[in-house]
Image: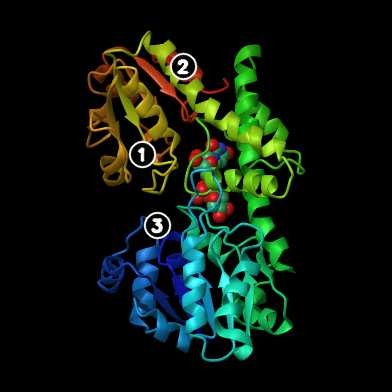
Amino acid sequence: MNICVIGTGYVGLVTGTCFADFGVTVECVDIDVKKIEMLKRGEIPIYEPGLKELVDKNVAEGRLTFTTDLTDSINRALVVFIAVGTPPQEDGSADLSHVKEVARTIAKNLNGYKVIVTKSTVPVGTGAIVEEIIRKECGAGHKFDVVSNPEFLREGSAIEDFMRPNRVVLGARSEQAVAIMKDLYSPLYLLETPFVITSVETSELIKYAANAFLATKISFINEVANLCEKVGADVSMVAKGMGLDHRVGAKFLHPGPGYGGSCFPKDTSAITKIAKAHGYTFRIVEAVIDVNARQMELMVEKIRKLAGSLNGIKIGALGIAFKPNTDDIRDSPAVYIIERLIAEGAIVKAYDPAGMDNAKQTLSKKVVYCKDAYEAAEGVDALVILTEWNQFRKLDLGRIKELLKSPKMADLRNVYEPASMKALGFEYVSVGR
Ligand code: UDX
């Protein structure tokens, strides 16, 4: 089977490459010539562990190609994936202009029955809009079906999440489209991966509801952590005790500076906007968003208290990316906190194993970039762990203590243990303990 994946960003590139690894012939298309040239040279524009090897293998075996020629790709494909960005607009709702533009282009190039799949996270009702655009552009001439097939990929483990998903969600109107999608996903189907086959609207909402719920778990445990600090409880034990209840589940109960990335902030905002647009106030998720914003502020407060003041103080920041194993700094709590520290007069030395290039393009010019955690610790009044990279889990704490001007650490990801840090002579604060 031939498919075409439009958009070689984070979702499109992983989706296309993994389908190629299933044995499907895949053309990944993008309007960004530079990006396509990079991909043709075997360079990967995003940081995703294991992706380069998978791209190289499938390009070498002739199943994966990259092109800017959307027309030919659509003509050759039976299934066309829309995997372009749906960034948040000013008011927080999703910007569908790229999706609509692609729908129009697809309509102009229909040369026979096709399945058009929205892979990007799109507001409920987008499938119907895409269908209407195509119907209008090409009249009753051509048969096609629109399918919703949301992605559940986490950055840093996207290939694993694609190859061994907890479920595949398909929203479709026709049996023919479902049959084609099942055939496309047959390697997973044979692995007995659960398939949720439902309406387009239901499929679109599953994605938002899942992400909003995960974000809710994070804001929930962050509030529990804040309460723990007041009552002298240990949030990691509370999370453990809660999580052993199978109805709660242990995952996504790690407190910290709040959630970030290109999904949770966007999707929580979008679902509240979708609700509002239909006359409903989604109060829990609105609270989740507020709690998340406040959590970052509370972290700045925590650092200010530890350091005594921030004006003229030197802070070492370990981690800029929104989570480990990614170079993505979009909506990263670390970025917000670093900018706030600088705004209050602090001097920030920062290190991140993968996010430095992206940081240099967007962070305040005042940030001093370091080559490793030890350089970031050198001569600062306090060291702050913002992202729980493995590189920060086994630091030589004796050396760190020597390098620090004063032995102070704010561990916002609870990487270390309070008792052992105290025994080492650190003035140590963390989250919820
Ligand atoms: C998320 C969803 O997990 C994924 O299914 C969806 O397709 C895209 O959005 P991602 O944004 O890549 O994936 O990262 P994720 O691992 O979910 O973490 C999101 C944020 O939550 C990060 O900032 C992370 O630090 C934070 N987080 C996560 C916590 O603060 N505590 C936790 O327990 C888990």
Please say if 20 is above or below 382: below
| Cβ atoms under marks 1 and 3 closer than 8 Å | no
Please say if 179 is above or below 29: below
Quadrant of the frame with the C terminus: top right
Q: What secondary structure is marked by label 1?
A: helix
N-terminal label among 2 and 1? 2
Q: Is residue 139 visible?
A: yes
Hey, which quadrant is residue 146 in on the image?
Answer: bottom right
Q: Is residue 21 visible?
A: no
Hey, which quadrant is residue 203 in on the image?
Answer: bottom right
Q: Ligand 1 closer than 8 Å to the CB at disc 1?
A: no
Q: Image check: 388 left or right of 166?
A: left
Q: Which mark is residue 301?
A: 2
| Cβ atoms under marks 2 and 3 closer than 8 Å | no
* Residue displayed at 35% across by 70% down: 31
Q: Amino acid at mark 2?
A: Glu
